[in-house]
Image (cartoon, rainbow, N blue to C red):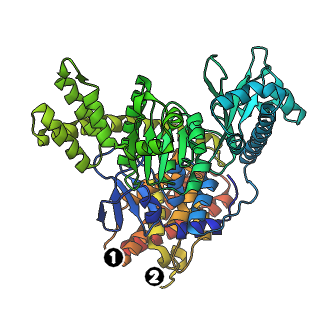
């Protein structure tokens, strides 16, 4: 990972308080002692088991086991690397974060590869743009004119053309000095059977895809006639994950609107921007994702979706509705209104604007239905036949299913009240059926989540075992007594530096521990100990995240032990238990060493060496007796 000064990390953790960071994603519903509780954003649950401790700067879910500090939370929720998360929080909380040289060759190499790919994409965009205005690009210019795309729009969106041929772009980029490995990383080529690289886009109008900051990360290619497929898009690559981006967000965010209009295709988005509806973005793929909803929520308070009116579009609308409602049930801190709109007569937004005008389209946007009203209409319309009327059985099934998706009890009751008029049932009965369906769904998802979590943890352990800096046998071994001692040392904080309360000889040291990993952590703990406030536990968790304890991620092992080690009733009692645990750890170590020395004494034949061993045994036994005495006096 990139090397960021520990002082900077400490400053980020001190300013980015855990309650504030997590509170943007999770609403806290109760408080117990120093802990705030809410629904876990990482797995399905009905009863809150996700806790935040503002004093420690840590979060933990007792259901799925995830836990850590503010940086770790952002890494998990935003799918960021450690330095990315530090920079992200630094920007939000006013801490300037500078990245030094990488301390990992692998991280440095990856960074350089990404940089080269970005350069390739930029050069490719220039090539496509120039080709559009060449003699070969006439067909593409004619298509753009047919779509009524103005020259200003073509320039603003960087529209280009990929000429026919299998290696035009390849030759151009090779002349620029790029090698085949980097070109493969770019996602701009496919590989032929003979191993040669072939241009992915050929004979197509090219649409550059930008990230939210305006950097080119991928491309889309639209056919110019009837050839299939209609669209060819860049695959996921080193710099592009389509599920994490929204097309034209770099332009739409400049509108500074509290509303985002989301359409299915980037050609629709381009046409709407040209028409002056500049708060429009497009999903990049057939399914809208929770990552895209989360991204949208950063820039808007409301999203209005337009789906195609065919069966595929209707199914996509249902899938997106279920996904979004499920996501917002977990991300209780994210507040965003979801509305679904339909263009009249089955037209797409682009076609409707051209035929009926911008003001008519704005009226369609204004009439968009809240997601709960849309779902009710779907349940009715899908099961109503002009000849036979409403199929009550299927209508009931759909209403209960759709109602179970709603996390807002008021909207659920509203849907049930509407349905009651058609089903001849009490709304309370329908709500109960919706709640049962919700609980069944949560139970199924919880079971699946637990399986996923277990697989993820096993994978994480395997990866850490392969990449651990301390690969020596048994380097990660930690006994329960050792871990309890460490937990209690962290817990008593500044008292550890108070010579009147704890003698210097009773301060833990790395040689009190056996495994190399725990010794490394203890060294870090002592080096970062502040006599006035102890050690930032959140900063300590960052260190723990680098190593394993007993084959487990150390930070998870530590947090689990924090729960198992009981809190004492007074600070004095905490100090006494720390000392008692220290004496037990040292006593067990003495006992093991005494057995070893006794074994060597029994085998030793040299009188001088025997006397030396006896002297060492007596000295160690005397220290052991002292530990026993001190422990008994507590």
**Farthest residue in the front direction?**
356
Q: Secondary structure at mark 1?
A: loop
Residue at (39, 70) in percent of width and height: 577
Q: Which residue is mark 1?
A: 570
Q: Earlier in the sequence, mark 2 or mark 1?
A: 2
Residue 542 placement, left or right of 48: right
Residue 250 is labelled as: none
The label on residue 501 is 2
Q: Nearer the viewer, mark 2 or mark 1?
A: 1
One can see residue 584 in this view: no
Question: Toward the viewer: 544 or 93?
Answer: 93
Question: How many dots with numbers?
Answer: 2
CA–CA distance in space, label 2 to label 1: 14 Å
Badge 1 crowding class, 10 Å Cα cut-off, few under 14, some 14 to 19, many 20 or more, is few
**Residue 579: quadrant of the picture:** bottom left
Q: Residue at x 12, y 39 (%)?
A: 429
Nearer to the camera, 80 or 216? 216
Is 494 located above or below residue 153 in the figure?
A: below
Residue 484 % position (x, y): 44, 60
Element at badge 2? loop
Q: Where residue 126 appears, x then y in whole percent?
A: 79, 39
555 relative position to 195: left or right: left
Q: Is 574 located above or below residue 247 in the figure?
A: below
Q: Picture quarter containing residue 56?
A: bottom left
Residue at (74% x, 54% y) in the render: 102
In the picture, which quadrant includes the C terminus?
bottom left
């Amino acid at each position: 990972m990139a090397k960021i000064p520990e002082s900077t990390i400490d400053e980020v953790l001190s300013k980015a308080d855990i309650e504030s960071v997590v509170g943007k994603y999770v609403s806290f519903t109760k408080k117990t002692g120093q802990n705030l509780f809410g629904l876990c954003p990482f797995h399905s649950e009905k009863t809150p088991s996700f806790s935040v401790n503002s004093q420690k700067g840590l979060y933990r879910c007792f259901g799925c086991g995830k836990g850590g500090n503010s940086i770790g939370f952002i890494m998990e929720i935003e799918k960021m690397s450690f330095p990315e998360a530090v920079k992200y929080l630094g920007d939000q909380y006013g801490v300037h974060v500078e990245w030094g040289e990488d301390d990992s060759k692998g991280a440095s190499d990856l960074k350089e590869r990404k940089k080269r790919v970005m350069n390739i994409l930029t050069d490719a965009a220039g090539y496509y743009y120039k080709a559009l205005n060449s003699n070969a690009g006439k067909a593409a210019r004619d298509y753009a004119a047919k779509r009524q795309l103005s020259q200003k729009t073509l320039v603003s969106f960087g529209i280009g053309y990929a000429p026919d041929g299998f290696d035009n772009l390849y030759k151009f980029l090779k002349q620029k000095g790029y090698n085949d490995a980097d070109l493969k990383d770019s996602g701009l080529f496919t590989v032929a059977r003979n191993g040669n690289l072939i241009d992915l886009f050929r004979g197509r109008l090219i649409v550059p895809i930008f990230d939210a900051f305006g950097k080119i990360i991928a491309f889309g290619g639209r056919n110019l006639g009837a050839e299939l497929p209609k669209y060819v898009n860049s695959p996921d690559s080193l710099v592009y994950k389509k599920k994490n981006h929204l097309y034209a967000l770099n332009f739409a965010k400049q509108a500074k609107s509290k509303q985002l209009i989301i359409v299915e295709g980037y050609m629709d988005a381009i046409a709407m921007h040209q028409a002056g509806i500049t708060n429009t973005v497009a999903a990049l793929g057939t399914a809208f994702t929770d990552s895209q909803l989360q991204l949208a929520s950063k820039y808007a308070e409301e999203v209005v979706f337009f789906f195609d009116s065919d069966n595929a579009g209707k199914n996509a609308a249902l899938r997106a509705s279920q996904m979004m409602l499920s996501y917002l049930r977990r991300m209780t801190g994210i507040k965003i209104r979801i509305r679904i709109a339909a263009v009249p007569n089955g037209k797409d937004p682009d076609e409707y604007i051209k035929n009926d005008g911008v003001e008519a389209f704005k009226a369609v946007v204004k009439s968009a239905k809240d997601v709960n009203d849309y779902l009710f209409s779907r349940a009715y319309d899908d099961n109503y036949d002009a000849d036979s009327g409403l199929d009550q059985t299927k209508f009931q099934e759909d209403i209960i299913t759709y109602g179970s998706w709603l996390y807002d009890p008021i909207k659920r009751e509203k849907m049930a009240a509407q349905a009651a008029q058609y089903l001849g049932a009490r709304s309370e009965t329908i709500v109960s059926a919706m709640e049962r369906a919700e609980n069944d769904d949560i139970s199924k998802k919880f079971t699946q989540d637990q399986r996923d979590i277990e697989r993820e943890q096993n994978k994480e352990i395997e990866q850490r075992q392969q990449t651990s800096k301390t690969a020596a046998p048994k380097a990660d071994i930690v006994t329960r007594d050792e871990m309890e001692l460490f937990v209690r040392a962290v817990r008593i904080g500044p008292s550890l530096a108070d010579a009147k309360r704890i003698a210097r000889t009773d301060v833990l040291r790395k040689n009190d521990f056996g495994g190399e990993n725990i010794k490394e952590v203890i060294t870090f703990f002592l080096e970062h100990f502040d006599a006035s406030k102890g050690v930032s536990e959140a900063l300590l968790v960052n260190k723990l995240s680098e190593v394993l304890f007993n084959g487990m991620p150390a930070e998870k092992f530590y947090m689990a032990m924090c729960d198992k080690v009981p809190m004492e009733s007074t600070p004095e009692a905490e100090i006494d238990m720390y000392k008692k645990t220290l004496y037990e750890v040292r006593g067990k170590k003495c006992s093991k060493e005494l057995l070893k020395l006794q074994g060597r004494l029994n085998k030793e034949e040299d009188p001088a060496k025997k006397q030396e061993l006896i002297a060492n045994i007596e000295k160690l036994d005397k220290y052991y007796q002292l530990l026993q005495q001190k422990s008994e006096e507590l």
